Structures are given as structure tokens and as C-alpha cells.
Image: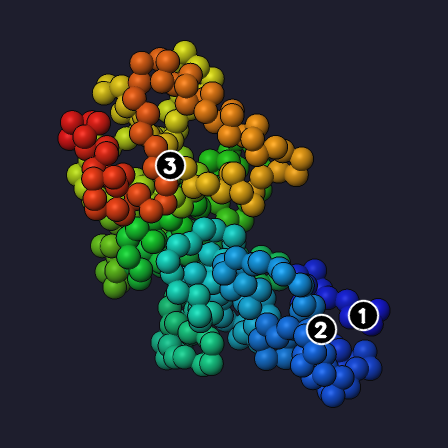
Amino acid sequence: MDALLRPDSHGLLRRTVLLTLGFTGGEIDRMLRTGALEAVRRGVYRLTEDGARRRPETEHALRGRAAGSGLAPDAAFGFVTAAALLRLPSWGVPLQRLHVIRARPNGARVRGDLQIHSGRLPDDDVLVVDGLRVTSPARTAVDLARTVPANRALVTLDGALHRAVVREQTGTPDPGAATPADIARVVARASGSPGAAAARRVLALADGLSESPGETLSRFRMHVAGLPAPVTQWPVPGTRHRTEFAWPDLGVVGEFDGRVKYGRSLRPGVDLTEVLWEEKRREDLIRATGRTVVRWIWPDIDDPGDDGMVARLQLTLGA
């Protein structure tokens, strides 16, 4: 590989830069045809990584960075694109288009893969992250809550609130963190705009102790089914463990098993068998306190049958 093919800090190579370094247009096109380069957006590439598996949100954020230099000075990335650039979780929100907000009454339109929205952009609703203007985590979460189904918006809102909890615990700055007060302020500012009532509903359901989209979606499904509201991240008395969901007065705890911790997120050098053994030992210790443990995985959350999460919790809780 040519030594001059040095991507920027985000792994991007721009055609204009390659031309200034002496590459010809024919050479660049040949590298694209042979697979040495991959197109991210028109005129922006990256080096091909054999067998690389990238999360769709990561791909979306990379496309946003590729498009960033072409944005108008009064524009900012928003909605799910801001969420991706802030590394906030999203779930089920379409990622085909990049979303941009411009503070102009006639700014709304679609231009290629850009969805341009018109809206006010107060200074405290905009951050600069890695040189790009993006809406703040609070504004991002509220805009999604106004425009996408409640369960999907709740994933991003919980994620921003949880990042604030972690920031408080660690003292580490985090541009993706938002406090309940931050969210409430943006919701109040959106009063009277389309979707404001939906945003208020999502805010009322939010929980900054939720640590993953699976936990958020489980809790939302419990709410819709009319199950008793659980205590989240509950320390189990008599143990050093906590559970994701608990109904202490009923002696029941709930655990969402996303299987991620047993797969690609396993730390290097950590033995899978040991992880599974520790998980079983943990559950045995919780059961030994006299509590009933109900576990579920992704497909169980929305399963309407007897083996689904809701049916098993209803039976166990007597709901």
C-alpha cells in the first residue's frame, strides 16, 4: 500500500487531499475498482478492511463525518445522526439518510442522502464534537422523542441520562451526557411544537439507571403490558450483586440477557467458560436468598406467547 495513503483520525481519505498528494483520478478510481479503497460518500473513502464488521450506527457516524465539511455554517447534525456522532444508543431508527438541522424557515428538504430539517438552534442546543456541529444530547433525545415511536426514542434518552450518571460517578467529561434537568429544559422549549406531548411522555418513562437498549425496551414492554413498575439496578440484600429489575416486595428479580457479554464484547484473555460459570454462580447466590429469578433474551421481549417475557412475569408476579 502506498505510504501516502494515510487516513485522518477517523479513517477517512478525501479525494481532494489525494489529488494534492499527487495521485491521479485514474489511480483513485482503480483503487476503488480493485477494492483497496471503499467509498464512504462521494469523494470520501477509507482503506478496505478485510472481514471487518461495523455496526450500522458506526457506519452512519462515519458518513456524517465525511459530509461534515460541506455543511452550511448555520447547520448542525441532528436526530439519529447526532446520536451516532455522540455515540448514543439508537434502536430501530432508519439510518439511510443523514439528518441536518438549519435555523431557516425554508430549510427543510431532501438533498441526496441528506435530510435537511428546518428548526431553531439556540446556542445551548449545539455542541462541537470532533470539529462537527451537532445538537446537544438533550436536544437530540427530545427531537427523536418528538418524531419516532416512544420505545425507540426511549433507548436514546435513557442512554444520554445513563451517561450523565456515569459522568457523575467518574468525573469524566462526556459530550453525550444529559441530565433530567437538561432534557426537561429542551422539552419545555418545544412546548406547542409537533410531537411535544410525545416527548413529555417519553421523558416521564426515562430511567438513567438503564444500562443497555435491551433493558430499556424490556422496561417499556412491561409498562405497555401494565406490569408493576420494577426497581432498576437493585442491590440484592445478603449478596454483592445487583439485578437489572426487581420487585422486592414480591421476592422477584428480572434479568435481561443480551448475550453480548458472552460474545464479541468479551475482553481479550477472558475465558468464556469462566464467564458462564460466574454468571451461574451469581444466579445461584441470588436464588439462595429466597428470591425467584426470571431471565429473558432479545426475542422474549416482544414474544406474545406463554414463553415471552410478559407472560412469565405476569405468572411470577401474580399480575
Residue 239 position by quadrant: top left
Q: Quadrant of the C terminus?
A: top left
Q: Position of residue 76 (x, y in %)?
A: 49, 66
- Identify which amino acid the numbered label 2 is placed on: Ala
Residue annotated with mark 1 = 1
Is tag 3's residue or tag 1's residue first in the polypeptide sequence? 1
Q: Is residue 139 visible?
A: no
Residue 256 marker: 3
- Mark 3 residue element: strand
- Identify which residue is drawn at 46% across, 75% down: 114
Q: Position of residue 175 (x, y in %)?
A: 54, 49
- Identify which amino acid the numbered label 3 is placed on: Phe
- Identify which residue is drawn at 56% across, 31% down: 273
Q: Is residue 280 left or right of residue 52?
A: left
Q: Is residue 210 left or right of residue 32?
A: left
Q: Quadrant of the N terminus?
A: bottom right
Residue annotated with mark 2 = 36
At label 1, counting other C-alpha atoms closer than 10 Å, the crowd grade (few under 14, some 14-19, many 20 or more) is few
- Mark 2 residue element: loop
Q: Is residue 304 above or below residue 55?
A: above
